Image (cartoon, rainbow, N blue to C red):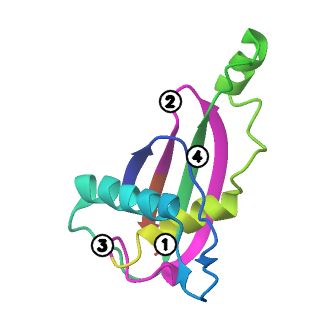
Amino acid sequence: MINFEIPGEPKSKARHRTTKTGIAYTPKKTTEYENWVRQCYCIKHRDKRLTGQIRAEIKAYFTIPKSTSKKKRIEMINKNIRPTKKPDTDNIAKIVLDSLNSIAFDDDKQVVELNVQKFYSENPRVEVELSEVS
């Protein structure tokens, strides 16, 4: 089993862009976040790599808005109120799993089970847990 944390506000995979001359590129913020995910993985699990079928669990924790009342803040911390805002869960999973290609596993096509959840927290982060399915 591999688990690690990506500190900071969760990001999503942005669509590639195309210039007027037809050159396709990945937006800078997406590339930077993918590199950050790789660094967080390598710090804790440098040479560890999964093979075969993989189960992925991703928990994204978003910052509680400053304008939130004390009552709602407590509800958010207790996970009774959860984010329904962007980024979408599928885009969070996409950026994390694409970042780990050739590092944690050969390709994200090996992921056969995926669970993505969104929560509020005073400590924004993404928690990733990967394990081989037996």
Mark 4 or mark 1, earlier in chain: 4
| Circle 2/circle 3 CB separation < 8 Å | no
Q: Which residue is mark 1?
A: 98
Which is more N-terminal, label 1 or label 3? 3
Picture coordinates of residue 37 (x, y %)? 40, 57
* Amino acid at circle 2: Asn
Extent of the magenta region: 103-127
Q: Which residue is mark 4?
A: 60
Give the vertical position of 44 relative to 102 (above or below).
above
Where is residue 125 shown, x and y percent of the image?
49, 41
User: Which residue is at the far bottom?
Assistant: 22
Amino acid beneath label 1: Asp
Identify the mark at residue 123; answer none if there is no mark.
2
Quadrant of residue 103 in the image? bottom left
Marks 2 and 3, the one that precedes in the sequence: 3
Front label number (4 vs 3): 4
Do the numbered discs 2 and 4 sit on residues whose CB atoms are within 8 Å?
A: no
Give the residue type that dot 3 points to: Arg
Residue under the image location 54 percent in, 42 percent down: 9
Neighbour class for label 1 at 10 Å: few (<14), some, many (≥20)?
Answer: some
| Residue 49 badge | 3
